[in-house]
Amino acid sequence: MKIMDVNLTGVMYTTHLAQYWLPKNPGSSDSSTTSDPSSPRDRHLLLLGSVASIGPIAIQPQYCASKHAVLGLFRSLRALTGLSGIRINMLLPYFIETPIVQPIARLALLGGAMGQVPDVVDAGTRLVCDSRILGRSIVIGPKMHVRQKDDGEWEVDGEGEVRSLWECCAEDWEDVESFNKFFIRALNLVQVGRGWGGWVKDLVGTGLYAVGLKK
């Protein structure tokens, strides 16, 4: 139950403390009505979910359950912003290039791509610093060249804009499988694009990481 203790119970305690203390923050304003992005004192809670919040990871049921729970907490709290005056946003990282991704997981991702820490920082910084943003959730994945089609859907295109951040909008939560289908298709196309060269590069990198020669 340690995963649940860290990813859910700890988050619930933190949320409880935020609900109590943030409204007492001297000089802060009600975030449900704040429109000034440079407001010096803000009431904001940023939750850390995962791509596992919206899709299953078969070999990690405890982790997946805990992150699904964080998603439920986020969806409930953002509906109460008008009452609490506290902004609520959430980050949903994919597999990010950090030591937490162990060699066995890196082997499973051979030939694919991982997200990068600077992209997570950029997304988090934007949500924290801009007091106009509330109730938004951002998926952070690997960088992809994409373009938006006339029907609003995105497709991988080598000449398109480079993106690593994807917002889950209201319609995605209503039919989350549509978002997952697009995201997985895009990741698969990235994997195909990298080909065997990317697979070999990842294999060598995983070996170096496993023996401590790569951080």
Image (cartoon, grey):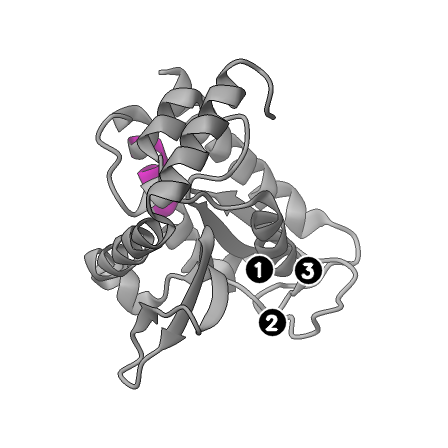
Gap in angstroms between the C-alphas marked 2 and 3: 16 Å
Q: Residue at x 49, y 49 (%)?
A: 91
Tell which circle, 2 or 3, labels the residue nearer the N-terminal end: 2
Q: Position of residue 71 (x, y in %)?
A: 36, 46
Q: Position of residue 82 (x, y in %)?
A: 50, 64
Q: Which residue range is magenta in the image? A: 65-71
In this rendering, is residue 45 above or below 60? below
Q: Compare residues 215 and 175 and report the one nearer the observer.
A: 215
- Front residue of this view, candidates 123 and 107: 107
CA gap between label 1 and label 2 equals: 8 Å
The vertical placement of 52 against 108, above or below, is: below
Task: Kindly give the residue lying farthest to the bottom in the view shown.
Answer: 150
| Label 1: which secondary element | loop
Mark 1–mark 2 CB contact (< 8 Å): yes
Q: Which mark is residue 85?
A: 1
Residue ID for mark 2: 33
- Badge 2 marks a residue whose secondary structure is loop
Quadrant for the N terminus, please: top left
Is there CB contact under 8 Å for labels 2 and 3?
A: no
Is label 3 in a helix, a strand or a loop?
helix
**Which residue is painted at 65% across and 51% down in the image?**
23
Of pointers 1 and 2, the one earlier in the residue sequence: 2
Front: mark 1 or 3:
3
**Going by the image, does 5 lie left or right of 133?**
left
Q: CA distance from mark 1 to mark 3?
A: 16 Å
